[in-house]
Image: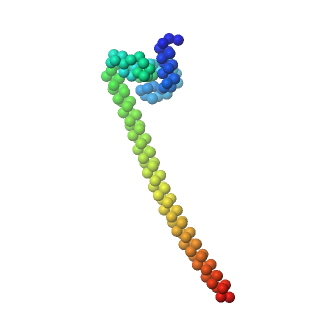
Amino acid sequence: MNKLSDIKNALIKRDGLKCAVTGEIIKDPDELMVDYVIPRSKGGSDELDNLQLVKKSVNIFLANDEKRIQTLTEELNKRQNVLTNRERELFEREQAYRLEIDQQKKQLEEVRLNIQKEQSKREALYESQIQELRRV
């Protein structure tokens, strides 16, 4: 094994078979390339902390610093939109659950009051029956 494949294997062990830019799970390790988080031309090191795995098709766009920034910014914006949408959906779902719980509480309270009224009527009926039996 050469040093590059050792590095790639270490990154796969650390991050799994996933493109660091798109988050996409990749089935074939050969579709992933080792890429610098901070390019060496900008002072980045060869340490694992500065390396990531990216799809070959994405890596082509990352070669140019401006394209790299644009691509990463676009991906970040996409992920932010996904998170915002998920957050909105979860908020709406929570609101619906809270409304449903409030409705169920009202229904439960109505049932409780009806049971109390029914119990009071029965107690009154039994009390009148007991009074009648005592008279006899």
Q: Residue furthest left?
A: 66
| 120 vs 109: above or below | below
* Residue at image coords 41%, 16%: 46
Residue 40 or residue 92, whichever sits in front: 40
Q: Position of residue 132 (x, y in %)?
A: 64, 85
Q: Which residue lies furthest to the bottom in this view?
A: 136
* Residue at image coords 47%, 14%: 4
Residue 87 seen in the figure: yes
Location of the C terminus (image quadrant): bottom right
| 87 vs 20: above or below | below
Q: Position of residue 70 (x, y in %)?
A: 33, 26
* Residue at image coords 35%, 29%: 73
| 90 vs 63: above or below | below
* Residue at image coords 66%, 85%: 134
Its colouring scheme is rainbow
| 81 vs 5: above or below | below
Q: Where is residue 6 in the image (x, y as percent from the top left)?
A: 50, 15
- Location of residue 67 by image quarter: top left
Q: Residue furthest right?
A: 136
Q: Where is residue 122 in the image (x, y as percent from the top left)?
A: 60, 75
In the shown orientation, is residue 9 left or right of residue 51? Answer: right
Residue 56 seen in the figure: no
Residue 3 or residue 53, whichever sits in front: 3
